[in-house]
Amino acid sequence: MNDNYKVFNDLSKVHKRSTNILILSLSSMFCCVLFCVYVMYRTNESVKNRFYLLDKGQKVGAVRINDPKRALEILCNGHIGNFHELFFSLEPDLRFIKRNIEGKALYMIDHSGERLYNRLVDQNYYEDVAKSDYSIEVEQDSISIEYARYPYPFRFVGKQRITKNGDTEYRNLITTGYIKETTSTPNNLNGLRIIHFKVVDNNDL
């Protein structure tokens, strides 16, 4: 009788111990699942609030911005400014010009930018820049964007500083257009595109 009781008691202890281990394992798994869900949620929120800073079309860093309106303003201003820098800043080097315009700027704009580029190519404008051995830099004065309408109308006001033979001249650069949201791609990280682009004024000062 005592032997039977002892065997039964040992089995009860083993069963109880197994039950405790099972409960502990399930609790640990549940905690791990909760932790993984929390980490995924935080990572997703971090990615959504991270925006890339660009310099002449190149990604130079990322910043976190929690205000969607402020993030949109930074992206739109940066997109417009980078486009003008890439498209209108020129060096006496046709390969440099094509790399900036064809390889970068035209991905940031619709067919209106390509039409302007082709017109300038037909007029031998870029060849004249290369042969004349002078450089053109864009100086931005202001960018105004109307966010109450979509696509967002914008107006860029700035100058082109032309350096040739040690002398400096300036040319007005005023443009208008609209900016809309589009799919982000490796060639257009901002996920924005300029449409209906027009050069309003580009006369000598």
Image (cartoon, rainbow, N blue to C red):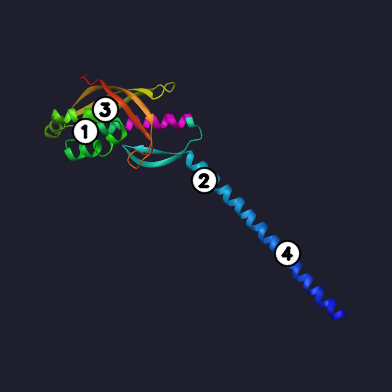
Whole-percent x, y for residue 46 in the image: 50, 42
Q: Amino acid at mark 2?
A: Thr
Whole-percent x, y for residue 56 in the image: 31, 37
Assign the magenta stretch its main secondary structure.
helix
- Tag shown at residue 73: none
Q: Mark 2 touching mark 3, by CB under 8 A?
A: no
Q: Amino acid at mark 1?
A: Leu
The residues colored magenta run 69-82
Q: Secondary structure at mark 1?
A: loop
Q: Quadrant of the C terminus?
A: top left
Dot 4 or dot 1: first in sequence order is 4
Indicate left or right for 104 with 132 as reference. Answer: right
Q: Secondary structure at mark 3?
A: helix
Dot 4 or dot 2: first in sequence order is 4
- Count neighbours of disc 4 (C-alpha within 10 A) and say few if under 14, some if 14 to 19, many if 20 or more: few
- Count neighbours of disc 2 (C-alpha within 10 A) and say few if under 14, some if 14 to 19, many if 20 or more: few
Q: Quadrant of residue 4?
A: bottom right
Q: CA distance from mark 2 to mark 3?
A: 39 Å
Whole-percent x, y for residue 133 in the image: 14, 34
Dot 3 or dot 4: first in sequence order is 4
The residue that mark 2 highlights is 43
Please, is residue 71 above or below residue 39 in the view? Answer: above
Dot 2 or dot 3: first in sequence order is 2
Please, is residue 20 above or below residue 114 in the view? Answer: below
Depth check, mark 4 against mark 1: the one in front is 4
Depth check, mark 1 against mark 2: the one in front is 2
The residue that mark 4 highlights is 19
Q: Nearer the viewer, residue 156 or 147?
A: 147
Dot 1 or dot 2: first in sequence order is 2
Q: CA distance from mark 4 to mark 1?
A: 76 Å
- Tag shown at residue 112: 3
The residue that mark 1 highlights is 90
